[in-house]
Amino acid sequence: MGHEVRISAILVFLVALSGCGNLDESNLEESNLEEFSGENLPTTLVESIDRLVSQYPTPSQENLNVFRSYSATPGQADLQAEWNPDGWGAEVNLSPIAWHDTWTNADGYGPTLGRGVAVTRRHVIAHHQHGTEAPGRTLQFVRRNGEIVTRMAAAEYEVDTSTYWRVLYLDSDLPEDMVAPLPTTNSVIAGKPIANLNQFHELRLQLVNSAVMNSSHVSVNGLRDSDPIRSLYFRAPISGDSGKPLFAIIGNEMVPLSFWWTTGGGSSIIFDQATIVQAIDRLSVRKSDTRLLQPRFVEVK
């Protein structure tokens, strides 16, 4: 499950950092994880999505948008957003997404696209080129209760650019309920529907190429699902969607799988899990965080 890669590194890190004190957690916000607990939630990808879309067999703008209202100014940490309670994915916890950051580059993509996902209380992963988050920039998240949560990116680690990953270290912890799990390395998504977000804050579905198994690339290639309801949620990516997450829905959790890089998909978090976890560890060591926070893992099947 990718854990072996970091075992020896963690032992070395612990010795090196043994003289550092634990970080003060006295000011952390309480978690509201109970909102997302449920004994009867499905545990597979297809069942999880079908449970949600079956409630909205005819998608419309009213149920495709994840927000009822959303506004933010380029270069300013002034995000205002209200979740859409009528969205088909309203039950899914999308609070790990960094929806807005203080990027000012007006290249047509806009700064309010949600290009990063928190995978520990301190670490955010993003696409190395299209992830606009960077050290010194402010990131803003939207908690499930509507609270705008603001953090600063204090450091970054750019993984070998051939794998297209950037990992950020935040200046303070996020609440636990704002953290997404990562997929295990034995996860299987080939031939299955996965969710994606676009620049219009729509929650859409893509179909993973069934011919691609254990690939370094999450390949969707504009494939439309044969299921009569799921197929209605398909929308091909366009210029401006780059960097947005592609993810599995398991129960009511998002599990990031990739970020849009081309119209065909993006690099696979399943394939690159060990490299991403190594970057998380290295950032923790650089910032003298002796807790060495680790992602939680969920099998996507």
Image: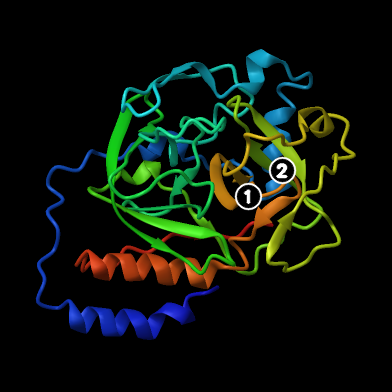
Residue 104 versus residue 129 in the image, above or below: above
- Residue 6 appears anywhere in the view: yes
| Residue type highlighted by circle 2 | Glu
Inter-mark Cα distance, 2 to 1: 7 Å
Compared across the picture, whether 90 is left or right of 289 comes to right
Write the residue at 49% across / 36% down.
114
| Residue type highlighted by circle 1 | Thr
Secondary structure found at label 2 = helix
Residue 17 versus residue 107 in the image, above or below: below
Q: Position of residue 297 (x, y in %)?
A: 50, 61
Compared across the picture, whether 114 is left or right of 260 comes to left
- Residue 250 appears anywhere in the view: no
Near mark 2 (Cα within 10 A), the count class, few <14, some 14-19 or many ≥20, is some
Colour option used = rainbow
- Residue 47: assigned label: 2
Marks 2 and 1 in Cβ contact (< 8 Å)? yes
For mark 1, what is the residue? 43
Q: Quadrant of residue 56?
A: top right
Looking at the rendered image, the quarter that the N terminus falls into is bottom right
Looking at the rendered structure, the number of numbered marks drawn on it comes to: 2
Q: Quadrant of residue 225?
A: top right
Looking at the rendered image, the quarter that the C terminus falls into is bottom right
Compared across the picture, whether 127 is left or right of 143 comes to right
Residue 285 versus residue 72 in the image, above or below: below
Q: Position of residue 23 (x, y in %)?
A: 14, 58
